[in-house]
Amino acid sequence: MPTPLPASPQLTLIGERINTHRESLRVKVFERDTAAVLEEMRKQQRVNVTHLDVNAGGSPSKESDDLLWILESILPELDAKTGLVLDSTSAECLSRALFRIQGRPGTIINAITNDADKLKAILPLVQQHRTSVVALCGSAKASPRTMEERLSAAEQLHSALSLGGIADEQIYFDPLILPLAHDPQQPSAVLATVRELRRRWPRAHTLVGVSNISFNMPKRSLLNRTFLAMLLASGVDSVLFDPCDAESASTLIAARALLGQDDFLTDYLSHAT
């Protein structure tokens, strides 16, 4: 039985499973297997995600058509309260998807950087469709390594978004996790960045793609769920993760109870009994 995730207005829980970078799903999308895509949606809805991430970038030459086909497949059954995260680096792809979903509440564009061409292409879509946006604390040219690099990128991007009329509440800062296997110092740098982002812009959100930390490592779920608890303790209020991983879901519930985010321990006691 899947573990229902906590229903908290302060926590954005984004399911990551509709992603064609996963080879098994990419094959199903290539075959236009509607049933397979719907099952991925249903599994995540059953555990109460607040948003579904939709990423069709696994086949770049077909990304736009694949993304639209996925949306056509899931929209008839998608709960009206479940937001969509349109995960693409292509402004054309995002534009077509946004026109298809017609101003759906809770929509988030993933993502924008401070690179001039990205701002010019993506910011008008955020403005026109009144979406929220993931603000990457880095650039297209290089991945950030230190807290200082991440915060410098965040400052520049926050300034550009503010000038464009984007409220802090619409911004989801992503400190850009580099895998533990790439650099063992990255987790601590990300945690420090999260704390400082929350201090500087308390009305904005912080979003982390949890599973990035364990790429190319054994026992990935162990690393993911441990880092998830650490992120929550550092102030993260939005996570992109696999909500169907029972151990990660349990960690999320336990961490929120220990952090005083579970009034009367309702979620924890319901889960534990």
Image (spheres, rainbow, N blue to C red):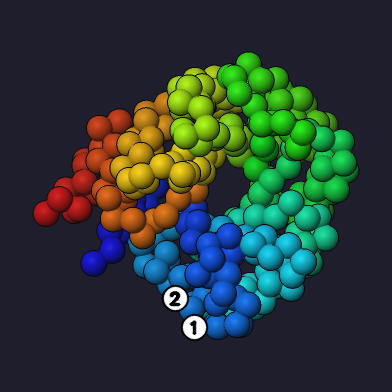
On the picture, is 234 further left or further right than 77?
left
Q: Nearer the viewer, residue 182 or 92?
A: 182
Q: Which residue is mark 2?
A: 39
Name which quarter of the figure residue 75 lies in: bottom right
Q: Which residue is mark 1?
A: 35
Q: Nearer the viewer, residue 202 or 108?
A: 108
Percent across and percent down for residue 36 are 48, 78
State whether residue 156 appears in this view.
Answer: yes
Where's the N terminus, which quadrant?
A: bottom left
Few, some or many residues within 10 Å of mark 2 (<14, 14–19, 20+): few
Q: Circles 2 and 1: CB distance less than 8 Å?
A: yes
On the picture, is 153 further left or further right than 44?
right
Percent across and percent down for residue 92 are 83, 60
User: How far apart are the two marked residues, 2 and 1, measured between alpha carbons?
Assistant: 6 Å
Amino acid identity at mark 1: Ala
Q: Nearer the viewer, residue 77 or 111?
A: 111
On the picture, is 93 further left or further right than 72?
right
Q: Give the residue drawn at x 50%, y 56%.
A: 16
Percent across and percent down for residue 252 are 32, 44
Q: Give the residue drawn at x 63%, y 77%.
A: 30
Amino acid identity at mark 2: Glu
Few, some or many residues within 10 Å of mark 1 (<14, 14–19, 20+): few
- Residue 135 position (above or below residue 122): above
Q: Give the residue drawn at x 42%, y 26%.
A: 234
> Which residue is outermost to the top?
148
Name which quarter of the figure residue 119 lies in: top right
Name which quarter of the figure residue 149 lies in: top right
On the picture, is 224 further left or further right than 15?
left
Q: Give the residue drawn at x 69%, y 65%.
A: 59
- Residue 236 position (above or below residue 46): above
